[in-house]
């Protein structure tokens, strides 16, 4: 699952190497730090794995139950009417521009 939020961009997968856990991957370390502000994930702040030989530099394994709670929290905390604007406000204009590039690329699916 790819998840693009006002907190960051995440790839969440079940790598099959830790039963009952999913791996949340991020390209930017602060994106994971932003997730650790959620009550269900605060206990994982010290568990980030950083690697330079993988497509996602930062990752953390969390229980599936904690991930489900975190995803629900993210959904409950939506407090904006325009996603692109709130990303610029909360993560900066560079990140908003990057997300806009993704939006534009995916928009082509709708037109084709």
Image (spheres, grey):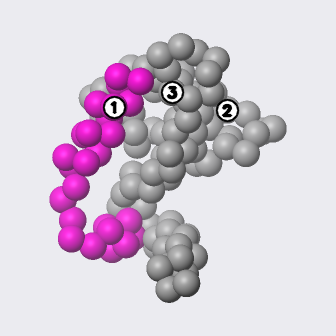
Cα gap from disc 3 to disc 1, whole angstroms: 10 Å
- Image position of 43 (left or right of 111): left
Sequence-wise, the earlier of marks 3 and 1 is 3
Sequence-wise, the earlier of marks 3 and 2 is 3
Could you tell me if the residues under marks 2 and 1 are in contact, i.e. CB atoms within 8 Å? Answer: no
The percent coordinates of residue 82 (x first, y second) are 27, 73
Which mark is drawn over residue 50? Answer: 2
Residue drawn at point x = 38 percent, y = 20 percent: 43
Which mark is drawn over residue 68? Answer: 1
Cα gap from disc 2 to disc 1, whole angstroms: 23 Å
Dot 3 corresponds to which residue? 22
The percent coordinates of residue 92 (x first, y second) are 44, 67
- Image position of 39 (left or right of 46): left
> Is residue 97 in view?
no
Front tag of 3 and 2: 3
Q: Is residue 106 magenta?
A: no
The percent coordinates of residue 97 (x first, y second) are 51, 75
Residue drawn at point x = 22 percent, y = 55 percent: 78
Q: Is 81 rendered above or below residue 64?
A: below
> Is residue 96 in view?
yes
Residue drawn at point x = 73 percent, y = 34 percent: 51
């Amino acid at each position: 699952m790819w998840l693009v939020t006002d907190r960051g961009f995440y790839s969440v997968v079940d790598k099959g190497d830790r039963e009952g856990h999913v791996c949340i991957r991020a390209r930017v370390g602060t994106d994971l730090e932003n997730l650790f502000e959620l009550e269900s994930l605060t206990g994982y702040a010290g568990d980030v794995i950083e690697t330079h030989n993988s497509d996602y530099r930062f990752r953390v394994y969390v229980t599936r139950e904690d991930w489900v709670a975190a995803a629900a929290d993210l959904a409950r905390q939506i407090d904006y009417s325009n996603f692109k604007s709130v990303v610029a406000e909360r993560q900066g204009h560079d990140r908003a521009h990057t997300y806009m590039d993704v939006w534009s690329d995916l928009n082509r699916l709708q037109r084709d």
